[in-house]
Amino acid sequence: MLNTHFTDISQYRDVESLNYFKILQEEGKSSDEALAIINERSRDNCRTPMQWDSSANDGFTTGTPWIEVPEYGKHITAESQINDETSIFSFYKKLIYLRKEYKIISDGEISFDESPEEIISYERKLGDKVLKVVGNLSENEADYSWSDEGYDRLIGNYDSAVNSSKGQVKLRPYEFAVFKNF
């Protein structure tokens, strides 16, 4: 599901968002500026009805929902994700499978690495097995390296393998990958 990004403050229900909108205007922000800030920060972003399918009210209810579903996200439904191999639903199924398949994911000791601000990097260790998780949290490509070699890519959020060699990776925007050395 996508965040709401409503076009008018009257579409919001969250009291905190409504009050903050007024405060922003009192501080000199225009209605458009204040709404843009609310669209980024409102708790209502995660309070819209679940978009189950493309039927009326997105399959959430036959009644009137307390808050509307944003129009621009109507094509993203739970139903549309089920048979799409590139969907978030399918990706999470793979992650759940890996968690069940590799005890290191749930039982391994975790240690975070020092890394540039745009990178998150950590290892999971269980016995002689090691998983290396690296993720780019920025909209730009980012380089990361570590001293170990012999890792194979286990999973990532891009279809193609991350550009890596001998402990060096070039991560695309918002890319993450998991490497294993067992």
Image (cartoon, rainbow, N blue to C red):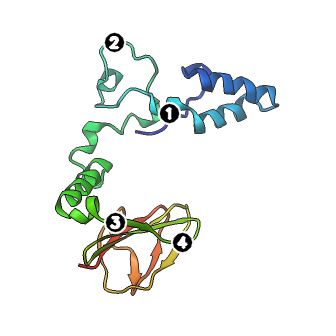
Q: Quadrant of residue 13?
A: top right
Mark toward the viewer: 4 or 2: 4
Q: Which residue is mark 3?
A: 109
Q: Which residue is mark 4?
A: 115
Name the residue located 50 percent from the left edge and 33 percent from the top edge: 45
Vertical position of residue 40 compared to residue 148: above or below: above
The span from disc 4 to disc 2 (Cα, nearest Å) is: 50 Å
Which quarter of the figure is the C terminus placed in? Answer: bottom left
Name the residue located 38 percent from the left edge and 13 percent from the top edge: 64
Instruction: Report helix, strand or loop for mark 4.
Output: loop
As shown in the figure, which amino acid type bears the numbered disc 3?
Glu
> What crowding class fits label 4: few (fewer than 14 Cα within 10 Å), some (14-19), or many (20 or more)?
some
Mark toward the viewer: 3 or 1: 3
Nearer-the-camera pick, 44 or 74 = 44
Which quarter of the figure is the N terminus placed in? Answer: top left
As shown in the figure, which amino acid type bears the numbered disc 4?
Ser
The span from disc 3 to disc 2 (Cα, nearest Å) is: 48 Å
Mark toward the viewer: 3 or 2: 3
Q: Which residue is mark 1?
A: 45
- Checking the image for residue 63, the label placed there is 2
Q: Quadrant of residue 79?
A: top left
Nearer-the-camera pick, 62 or 135 = 135
Question: N-terminal of the two: label 2 or label 1?
Answer: 1
The span from disc 3 to disc 4 (Cα, nearest Å) is: 19 Å
